[in-house]
Amino acid sequence: MSGPTLVIELAQAPAPAALREFGALMTRLCPTLTENRPGSYDGHVLADRLGIPDRPEWAPPPRHQAPADPAPAALRRPGLHLHRPFLVYLMGPGIGDEPLFEAEHADQPALDAALGYRPTHAVNVSACCNDDLDHLATALLTAAVMDAVGGLAAAELATGQAGIVAGLPGLLAVTEDDWPTAVGTAAFLRAWAEQPGFRLMK
């Protein structure tokens, strides 16, 4: 992915009711949505439906077009830049992407200790762009998915970010390894996203 990714670590596979809620959430947030399989989605998330206001600094740069070839009406709509492309997918045994899940969870004793369990499944929330808006949308989308399926978020921290997240509500632990990872609830992601200069690891 060209943008940030957050992972929701699950202690068990989501129940059918949670999967239905997950699907309903993605349908509400995405004007166009491709469901590759149950729990795996590809679409443009409407950032304003996550509570992100339309701001001038998030507008794309002006398109330089010849007068005879004006930009299509769809590209001149206000707020078009709030349509952010994402891949959001559940993975694990009996669900799909088992080899990817196994590779990403093969050896992570520090993370397992911070979580308090060894994950059996996970949800990856991956932005396809890397603007500030995409970092904010990734955090808020991940929190919304957690409201549906549960689990805890694992977010790698850049240098100096451990001090920023310390004391935020919902932070459960920060691993002490070469790449520290914050483990927290949906409330933690929302609180962190409110901090000035918020940025996820890419």
Image (cartoon, rainbow, N blue to C red):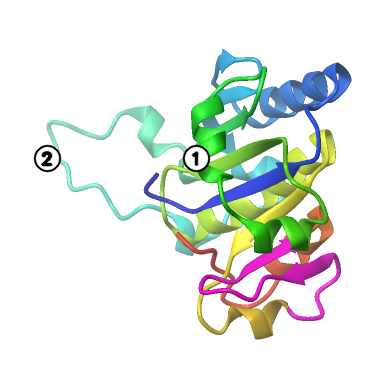
Residue 103: mark in rendering: 1
Is residue 137 rendered magenta in the image?
no
Looking at the picture, how far across and down is residue 45, in whole percent?
Answer: 58, 36
Please give the name of the residue rendered at 45% of the width and 37% of the height, measured from the top-left corner: 77
Q: Earlier in the sequence, mark 2 or mark 1?
A: 2
Residue 78 seen in this snapshot:
no
Please give the name of the residue rendered at 77% of the width and 67% of the height, measured from the top-left corner: 191
Amino acid at circle 2 = Ala
Placement of the N terminus among the 4 image quadrants: top left
Residue 16 seen in this snapshot:
yes
Element assignment for label 2:
loop
Is 187 above or below relative to 96?
Answer: below
CA neighbours of label 2 inside 10 A, class few (<14), some (14 to 19), many (20+):
few
Amino acid at circle 1 = Ala
Please give the name of the residue rendered at 75% of the width and 80% of the height, measured from the top-left corner: 166
Looking at the picture, how far across and down is residue 198, in whole percent?
Answer: 59, 71
Is 188 above or below relative to 64?
Answer: below
First to last magenta residue range: 166-183
Residue tagged 2: 66
CA neighbours of label 1 inside 10 A, class few (<14), some (14 to 19), many (20+):
few
